[in-house]
Image (spheres, rainbow, N blue to C red):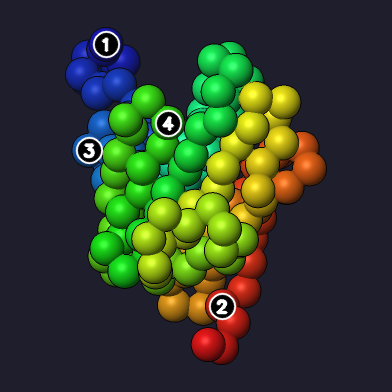
Amino acid sequence: MSVSGRVVAPARTAGFTLLETLLVMTLMAAAAILAAMVFTGGMDGMRLRAESKEIAAQLRYTRARAIATGQPQLFRIDPRAHAWEAAGDRRGEIDGSLGVRFTGVREAQARAGEGAILFFPDGGSTGGRVTLSAGTAAWSADVAWLTGETRLLRDEVRAP
């Protein structure tokens, strides 16, 4: 553009470059991830919740299988070995960094030191509780004896 014979450069508009915008977005994402880990207990908290949800899901599956087949089904847990067995030959291991505790009836135990919950074809069970803990946090999969319903509850670590 020319004004009285002089060439004038177009006015530069204010703004951010793409690089500046990406840098700010990256910093915000990193801060959000760190904040989420602090509020949820970090990796141990995420591992604790994931393992607790898996145990609750296997308990529910075992109950559903008892109802569907019309045959009693057994869920077993070995706190010392950090291992469980559910209906349908399902097996799994619990992360070794987590504490495992079982509370239930002795009559359903197959072996000493092992816990078991027996689910009946009518949906009922012998009842019990599987508690997983990490540090001071704990989650319990609580099975009602009358209905066999499994609920996952936030719990507290109790002194032995």
Instruction: Compare marks 4 and 3 and give the one earlier in the sequence.
Output: 3
Instruction: Compare marks 1 and 3 and give the one earlier in the sequence.
Output: 1
Distance (Cα) linking label 4 and label 2: 29 Å
**Of helix, strand and loop, which one carries label 3?**
helix
Residue, disc 2: 157
Badge 1: residue crowd in 10 Å (few <14, some 14–19, many ≥20): few
Q: Is residue 74 left or right of residue 42?
A: right
Is label 1 or label 4 in front?
A: 4
**Of helix, strand and loop, which one carries label 2?**
loop
**Residue 155 image-quadrant placement:** bottom right
**Residue 118 image-quadrant placement:** top right
Distance (Cα) linking label 1 and label 4: 81 Å
Is label 3 or label 2 in front?
A: 2
Residue, disc 4: 87
Distance (Cα) linking label 1 and label 3: 30 Å
Residue type, mark 4 in image:
Ala
Residue type, mark 2 in image:
Val
